[in-house]
Amino acid sequence: VTVLRRDWNKSISMAELVELRDRLDTMLQSIRSERGILTPLMTCRSCGSTGHAAAPRVSFRALILSLARFEIASPDEVRSLEKSWNRYRHEEGLDLHGQEAGRITARCSGRTRVSRPVQSTGRATRRAAERDR
């Protein structure tokens, strides 16, 4: 928050905001690394393999919304900045993190879907169970 307060001003360009987001993301990653914070274990629904989830990143929208949350910018400024960001992002072909948008290169190789029973006590589920009897 201190870095955000120090480095943000009303006349900052979108390119400078992308650099600020990059710095904040680097800070997040270094804090997680220094403190040994691991991401949660996840299980793939397609193949059932287990591994660590992707590390969290600071999105550009999170940066913008934090300006309002910590009262660094007024709600009107934040709304205007969000609209400007969306326009800039589409014009420049950027993703949600201000990086050049690319295609997903890694996908699960599993073809079978691991199904797990859904436990629900809702009225619709009971009706479906009674109908199937």
Image (cartoon, rainbow, N blue to C red):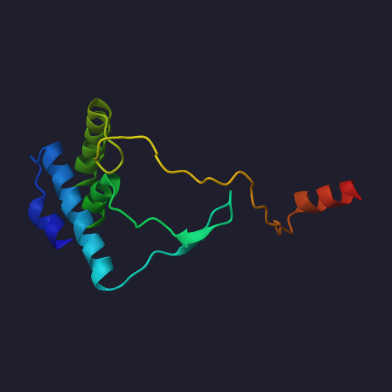
Name the one closer to the observer, 97 or 100: 100
Q: Residue furthest bottom?
A: 35
> Between residues 80 and 12, which one lies in front from this camera angle?
12
Outermost residue on the right side: it is 133
Q: What is the residue that sits farthest to the front in this orientation?
A: 109
Place of residue 4 in the rendered image (x, y in percent of width and height, measured from the top left): 15, 55
Left or right: 98 in relation to 124: left
Displayed quadrant of residue 98: top left
State whether residue 114 appears in this view: yes
Query: Viewed as shown, does residue 25 lie left or right of 43?
Result: left
Please tell me which residue is depicted at 68% across the width and 56% down the height of the picture: 116
Residue 103 position in % (x across, y down): 37, 35
Q: Residue furthest top?
A: 91
The answer to whether residue 72 of the structure is visible from this angle is: no
- 85 relative to 37, above or below: above
User: Which quadrant of the figure contains the N terminus?
Assistant: bottom left
Q: Is residue 104 left or right of residue 108?
A: left
Q: Position of residue 26 (x, y in %)?
A: 20, 57
> Can you give x and y, in whole percent of width and height, for residue 93 in the image?
27, 29
- Tell me which corner region of the image, top left, top right, bottom left or bottom right, holds residue 60: top left
Q: Nearer the viewer, residue 110 or 43?
A: 110
Give the image quarter of residue 33. Answer: bottom left
Q: Residue at x 23, y 67 (%)?
A: 31
